[in-house]
Amino acid sequence: MRILHDRSLIIKIIVFLSSALLSMACQSADSIKVELPDILLPSGAKWQWIAKDMIINGYPMSIKAFVYQDGEEKFIKFYDKFCREHGARYLSNDGSDQSRILGCQLLGGNYYLSIIIEPAAKKLSTYKYHPQIEGKITVSLAPGKAKVNTLTQFPVLVGSKIISKIESNDGERQVQTIVFENNNSVRANIKYLNRELAKAGFSPEYTNEALSNSKNAQVNFEKAGELVQVTVKPGKLGSQTSVLVHWVR
């Protein structure tokens, strides 16, 4: 079950969730709540939630961002001991950006811990590099402990393939982020969503001028208590059109 533990997917999710979410006064849907173990950090580490309650393709997950001043070696030793006490441990290197991944299964194999360690921008101090590191800690259900679920109530063109569905909270609001691909043009996707969302009572709030099939298109839709942001990107060299939907309820 690589969908949760594939490094590139995790990084894409982290980058998206680290960016500023849409902020708009909306009535809230029921908040998403997930039950996952809260993983401690080494003494002195600073951290913040990126997503405390999140579901990715049916799998509950939480993500913390951290900064640690005492260096990578000490940080890894802390989690090496932690993982050996709770399950199998692996460590890998990525030669392109020198990031590392530490991971293990927890609590009898029911949960999975993954830590991406990325050395922060190094600063020269008295001819020595500062040892600060930063990264992200994710906790999720282990593979096979939940059913993959990419079903959504959002209108999707027939023949589209849903790549991911992320459910999370933005304050008291519920957010669903969907990525899907299809063989239709940018214009065809926009026309379809304009029609289907109008049937559901949404009104276009903003449409950019780039609606040709060779450029990105972005449309915001709004109705009482809900906001939808749609970004459509054309494929390159015969690849499929990509649609990103950010639905705040």
Image (tube, rainbow, N blue to C red):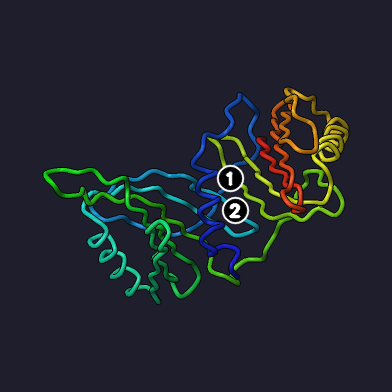
Indicate the quadrant containing the C terminus: top left, top right, bottom left or bottom right: top right
Indicate the quadrant containing the N terminus: top left, top right, bottom left or bottom right: bottom right
Along the horizontal axis of the image, is 57 left or right of 21? right
Mark 2 highlights which residue?
55
Q: Position of residue 125 (x, y in %)?
A: 15, 43
At 79% from the left edge and 31% from the top edge, which residue is drawn?
A: 211
Along the horizontal axis of the image, is 183 left or right of 248? right
Q: Position of residue 217 (x, y in %)?
A: 73, 33
* Front-lying residue, 125 or 105: 125
Work out whether 3 lies above or below 14: below
At 88% from the left edge and 33% from the top edge, which residue is drawn?
A: 195
* Front-lying residue, 165 or 214: 214
Work out whether 20 lies above or below 103: above
Which quadrant of the view contains residue 243? top right
Amino acid, disc 2: Ile
Work out whether 121 lies above or below 77: above
Mark 1 highlights which residue?
168
Along the horizontal axis of the image, is 119 left or right of 234? left
Mark 2, residues whose alpha carbon is within 10 Å: few (<14), some, or many (≥20)? Answer: many
Q: Secondary structure at mark 2?
A: strand
Asked if the residue at tag 1 contacts the one at tag 2, i.e. Cβ–Cβ closer than 8 Å, the answer is yes
At 45% from the left edge and 75% from the top edge, which residue is drawn?
A: 108
Q: Position of residue 187 (x, y in %)?
A: 83, 36
Q: Position of residue 130 (x, y in %)?
A: 21, 48
Along the horizontal axis of the image, is 164 left or right of 203? left
Amino acid, disc 1: Ser
Q: Mark 2 or 1 closer to N-term?
A: 2
At 86% from the left edge and 39% from the top edge, which residue is drawn?
A: 188
The CA distance from mark 2 to mark 1 is 6 Å
Q: Secondary structure at mark 1?
A: strand
